[in-house]
Image (cartoon, rainbow, N blue to C red):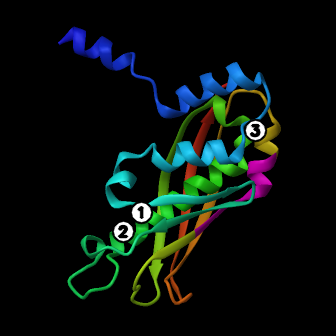
Amino acid sequence: MLSNMSAQSEIRSPLEMVREAHFQANGDAPPNLEQLRSVIDTMVPFCNLTGVRVVELRRDGGVAELPNRPDLQNHMGTVHAAAQFLAAEVSGAAAFSGALAPRIFSLRSFVLRDCRIMYLRPAVGRIRAHGSVDIEVAHPAAERTAEERFEIRGGSLLYDDAGALVAKAEFDYRAWFDAS
């Protein structure tokens, strides 16, 4: 049993592997948002299962897409509420990563503490979730270097293939950064 535990402690996260490769290639320069997007896009196994993808990552937001698949529909033939929630939360986490990109490699933890989602109408087809975080909190935190923990609010607006707003979500996150 102990050998399994020590083997697990040696497993590095995708973000740790990108951090190492980035520092070897670029020194202390901030990460490229496209490189960061590609890591975030595949680092959560449940997103890989459902097909949710981060398709845009900017300093002011992120966009996640949920594909149009029969296994993501409910018994009424519309997009399942849980699948919509996943797309919303992923877009919020992407927005956080983009807003705090200059400091992302010193992130120790980032957790969703509370959320609220309002489903406004039945969703049909592919869903695009547009996430954001409070940049008045995020951008100053991205420039600081001390160890800190803070809370940050985020949100997401979800649109279906017809461009209709089908849901909106609010998130409360807790972030913990090591000194950098």
Image coords of residue 179 (percent x, y):
71, 24
Q: Residue furthest front?
A: 25
Q: Secondary structure at mark 3?
A: helix
Three-letter amino acid code at disc 1? Leu
Three-letter amino acid code at disc 3? Pro
Q: Residue furthest left?
A: 1
Judge whether 120 appears above or below 86 on screen.
Answer: below
Q: How far apart in space, not on screen, are marks 1 and 2 (Cα)?
A: 5 Å
Judge whether 6 appears above or below 130 on screen.
Answer: above
User: Mark 1 — residue?
Assistant: 86
Callout 1 crowding tier (Cα within 10 Å): few <14, some 14–19, many ≥20: some
Whether label 1 touches label 2, CB < 8 Å: yes
Q: Is residue 138 left or right of residue 131?
A: right
Asked if one can make out residue 152 in the rendered structure from this viewpoint, the answer is no
User: Mark 3 — residue?
Assistant: 102
User: Which residue is located at x 68 percent, y 61 percent?
Assistant: 61
User: Mark 2 — residue?
Assistant: 83
Three-letter amino acid code at disc 2? Ala
User: Which residue is located at x 27 percent, y 15 percent?
Assistant: 5
Q: Which residues are magenta?
A: 130-139
